[in-house]
Amino acid sequence: MVVKVLVVDDSGFFRRRVSEILSADPNIQVVGTATNGREAIDQALALKPDVITMDYEMPMMDGITAVRNIMQRCPTPVLMFSSLTHEGARVTLDALDAGAVDFLPKNFEDISRNPEKVKQLLCEKVHSIARSNRRSIGAAIAAPAPSANTLGKPTAASSLGRPNLGAPAPVAGAPLASTAAPKRKAYKLVAIGTSTGGPVALQRVLTQLPGNFPAPIVLIQHMPAAFTKAFAERLDKLCRINVKEAEDGDLLRPGLALLAPGGKQMMVDGRGAIRILPGDERLNYKPCVDITFGSAAKSYRDKVLAVVLTGMGADGREGARLLKEGGSQVWAQDEASCVIYGMPMAVVKANLVDAVYGLDDIGRHLAEACL
């Protein structure tokens, strides 16, 4: 199936280059371009593309406002382009909250220096998000959480809503979400791995946890190095638990979630200490869910509760296998609430899960299982 793409950017050079790269793929068709957010909304309504690539900083209307409007009027998978700066990270996280599915760094030098690598990455992203679950995109629109810039630690759990787009159609062979209460246990660690769709999913899970959550938490989100600190800061402001970007030597403690730093690998040891290692170029993911899950299996055997959330690929499957061999519990997000049902599907198909839950039930069940 040919993927129809709308390219939105106020830079004529960038519009042309992105259009040229995408058009070189025989299974992608650029059906239109737009120079600002208002044009993007009009073109999205008129052309009904399968995917929209979106810049943030544009005249007339910025990209985040455009994404929010598109999600309200014609929900469409959006791929944001972002600068690799702390401010770029903040803006990108705002765009994901508004409903964008994924993002790519906007780097003019890379386009000139590594055209083949850029072409491959961009086309892969477009194809993957074209297959995303339209019923779960735009998750922040219906009932957005208060701004991370102004919110202190909330006194009641806050979580992101999503549009009421109707119940998703059942998928043949897909596991149904579990309805039974989770197994209660004195877990020494909760480990959560995710990728595409993960920033919003993690917000919705972690904001449901009470401040006295008794287990330490480690988070593995596929994300560039420039983004993880800003993401940890945002989660810390939104959640009643504490969240920080992990550093080498950090100690696990109840009510603290440690986010793996982008570009590196995070491991836990039996003394409850975090080890941060350089990102191995031989590994596709930095950070890698399998690495962290595997170290947790070695250190804590049957005392880990692992959760695999939305994301592309199969990262987490082999780590989940090690956890199961040690007697730990593994949960997966259900297909209906995933943006991309890749990582959860991998552990489900490998028969490694103890329970499958909808996204909005995972936080509550974590509290029930650990309290």
Image: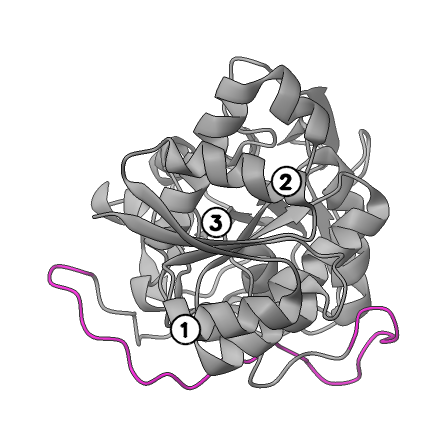
Is residue 52 shown above or below 12?
below
Please say if the residues under marks 2 and 1 sit with CB atoms less than 8 Å apart: no
Q: Name the residue under label 3.
A: 306
- Helix, strand or loop at disc 1? helix
Label 1, on which residue? 46
Q: Quadrant of the C terminus?
A: bottom right
**In the picture provided, is 166 more to the left or to the right than 39?**
left
Classed neighbour count for the residue bearing mark 1: other residues with Cα under 10 Å, few (<14), some (14–19), many (≥20)? few
Q: Position of residue 156 (x, y in %)?
A: 73, 85
Q: What is the spatial separation of the Cα atoms under label 2 and label 1, in whole angstroms?
A: 23 Å
Residue shown at the point (20%, 48%) measured from the top left: 1
- Real-space CA distance between mark 2 and mark 3, rounded to the nearest whole angstrom: 41 Å
Q: Distance between the residues labelled 1 and 3?
A: 44 Å
Residue tagged 2: 14
Number of the front mark, 2 or 3 = 2
Q: Is residue 26 above or below residue 143?
A: above
Question: Looking at the rendering, which quadrant does residue 91 occupy?
Answer: bottom right
Question: Which residues make up the magenta segment?
Answer: 147-174
Chief secondary structure of the magenta span? loop
At label 2, which amino acid type do we have?
A: Phe
Report x, y in % for residue 153.
84, 74
Q: Does the magenta stretch include residue 246?
A: no
The residue carrying pointer 3 sits among few (fewer than 14), some (14 to 19) or many (20 or more) residues within 10 Å by Cα, namely many
- Of helix, strand and loop, which one carries label 3? strand
At mark 2, the secondary structure is helix
Q: Residue at x 17, y 65 (%)?
A: 171
179 sits left or right of 209 in the view = left
| Residue 150 magenta-highlighted | yes
Type of residue at label 1?
Ala
